[in-house]
Amino acid sequence: MKRISTGQLEPGMRVDEDVTNLDHQLIIKKGTVLTDAIITKLNLYGILTVYIDEKYKATPEKIPTQSYYERVRESKEFKEFKKEYDAEVDSFKFHLNNVVERNATIDVKEMLAVPLKLILEAKGRVGVLDMLSNMREYDDSTFNHCLNVALICNVFATWLKMDEKEVEMATACGLFHDIGKLLIPKEIVTKPGALTDAEYMEIKRHPEEGYRLLLDNHVDKHICNAALMHHERCDGGGYPLRLKDKYIDGYAKMVAIADVYDAMTSARVYRGPLCPFKVIEIFESEGLQRYDVNFVLTFLENICNTYIQNKCRLSDGREGQIIFINKYSLSRPIVQCGSEYVDLSQEPNSIFIESLL
Ligand SMILES: [Fe+2]
Ligand SMILES: [Fe+2]
């Protein structure tokens, strides 16, 4: 038995001890063989280290081909978007550093120009969300993450049919949500490998730190609230205040979903971005009641709908086309394989969409 940090886990390793969260709730059982989705889940629950059975060797899981994402990456649109994104993230970084290190005042309007420009230029191209999934392959900085969450919130707000002012507010809430991380010692935020309990507690201070900084700058209250409350969960299981549903700012609820989504879809070195249907499955298995139900369903439904008619490969090797999204089981749509219609909601759990083609 060997204890290793969550960042070093790979699919195919076997867990040698039950994994529980800080509240001692079981997350995965001893003996579970890890998959991408499980590793992502462990990260989301903030699990730092896991005991694995070093003698166990699973037959190497074939790494699913990422041809869908390869296509996105190779498209002209993506290359242009990436160029603009890289330039904009630099300017955002410059502004934010001025605020944190040189006490410059926060000019929300000016800083909001960055994501709004990107969105405007990306309109009508390959989905912004798909492009973002390909963006963070090697760069996990707080700046990239904040910009991503801002862009996701922007798209999300239009799905919620918000008006222009509200769409801008949601974008701003995403943009500043993790600003508090810049006030936590860099060594901790960027530390590779496992964090100590004390370091983990330190990172968990970022919502309050961000809130205070934004409040000092007399920024709109929703932006302050989103920084403070984006780790709260509707069932009261979040932090720092363990607020329940009705006490959480609506914009913070949106940011919470966009934040988790960005963390899940970010690419890792040993694989491309997680298949969107797996992401949805993780949301479903984690419990949709942790989020605002209307928000999370709108978000996931819209993501699913993007992939109608997309080709996909199932876990049993069959290939087909996604033809119908089941509202009651979003991660398990109906797939047409040749002349056969496979309703995944009726199939055993071992059959799922493994990758998009
Ligand atoms: Fe955060
Ligand atoms: Fe975040």
Image (cartoon, rainbow, N blue to C red):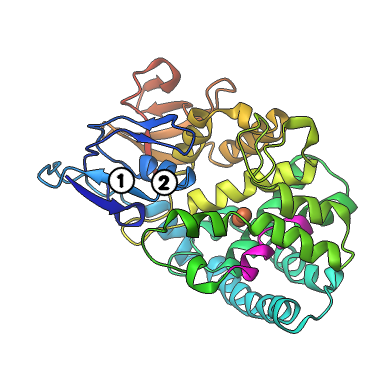
- Ligand 2's quadrant: bottom right
Under mark 1, the amino acid is: Val
Q: How many marks?
A: 2
- In the depicted view, which residue is nearer to us: 309 or 157? 157
- Mark 1: secondary structure: strand
Q: Position of residue 262 (x, y in %)?
A: 56, 52
The residue located at (86%, 69%) in the rendering is: 109
Quarter of the image where one finds residue 195: bottom left
Q: Position of residue 223 (x, y in %)?
A: 81, 56
Read off the residue under disc 1.
Answer: 50
Q: Position of residue 318 (x, y in %)?
A: 29, 32
- In the depicted view, which residue is nearer to us: 180 or 22? 22
The residue located at (64%, 59%) in the rendering is: 206
- In the depicted view, which residue is nearer to us: 13 or 188? 188
Under mark 2, the amino acid is: Ile
Read off the residue under disc 2.
Answer: 47
Residue 50 higher or lower than 16, as above or below: below
Residue 2 higher or lower than 108, as above or below: above
Residue 194 higher or lower than 38, as above or below: below
Q: Which residues are magenta?
A: 172-184
The residue located at (76%, 58%) in the rendering is: 211
Asked if residue 122 is among those painted magenta in the image, a careful observer would answer: no
Does residue 127 appear in the picture of this structure?
Answer: no
- In the depicted view, which residue is nearer to us: 98 or 276? 98
Q: CA distance from mark 1 to mark 2?
A: 8 Å
Does residue 318 appear in the picture of this structure?
Answer: yes
Does residue 87 appear left or right of residue 325 in this picture?
A: right
